[in-house]
Image (cartoon, rainbow, N blue to C red):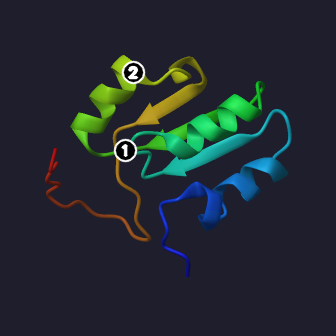
Amino acid sequence: MNRSLNGAVNGEIWLAGLLPPEAIVVDVGFNRGDFSALVLQSRPGARAIAFEPARSMQRRFESEFPYRGRVHMLPYAVSNRAGSVRFRDSA
């Protein structure tokens, strides 16, 4: 498993290049939106559904993300089972 945050080596650039022009991507753990931005910049007809539980990153998205009109942001974490936990935003 490659855990690199560098998109040039972790496969994100390669994956984005395989997507059709009007792709819909699901970005789980949106954070600053680097992957979504890569897709939305290279695929003008693409849209994204983003999951980000950190309020600090949601505020950053609302104020700074250049493609926010093409992203549906959901303020939730994603897991393999239903439930709830206390989330601590370390911003």
Q: Which mark, by number, is residue 64?
A: 2
Left or right: residue 2 compared with residue 22 = left
- Please state the horizontal and vertical placement of residue 54, each as a whole percent of the image: 26, 44
- Please state the horizontal and vertical placement of residue 24, each as a whole percent of the image: 70, 40
In three-dimensional space, the C-alpha distance between marks 2 and 1, rounded to whole angstroms, equals 15 Å
> In the rendered image of this protein, does residue 9 appear above or below residue 55?
below
Dots 2, 1 in contact, CB < 8 A: no
Looking at the rendered image, the quarter that the N terminus falls into is bottom right
Residue at image x 30%, y 46%?
53
- Please state the horizontal and vertical placement of residue 66, each as a whole percent of the image: 52, 20
Q: How many marks?
A: 2
Residue at image x 23%, y 36%?
55
Residue picked out by circle 1: 52
Amino acid carrying mark 2 in the image = Glu
Residue at image x 44%, y 71%?
80
Amino acid carrying mark 1 in the image = Glu
Looking at the rendered image, the quarter that the C terminus falls into is top left
Secondary structure of residue under mark 2: helix
> In the rendered image of this protein, does residue 57 appear above or below residue 88?
above
> In the rendered image of this protein, does residue 50 appear above or below residue 41?
below
Left or right: residue 63 compared with residue 8 = left
Left or right: residue 72 compared with residue 45 = left
Mark 2 vs mark 1: give the one in front: 2
Sequence-wise first label, 2 or 1 = 1
Q: Which mark, by number, is residue 35?
A: none
Residue at image x 39%, y 21%?
64
- Please state the horizontal and vertical placement of residue 78, each as a whole percent of the image: 41, 58
Secondary structure of residue under mark 1: loop
Left or right: residue 69 compared with residue 11 = left
Circle 1 packing at 10 Å, graded few (<14), some (14-19), many (20+), is many
Circle 2 packing at 10 Å, graded few (<14), some (14-19), many (20+), is few
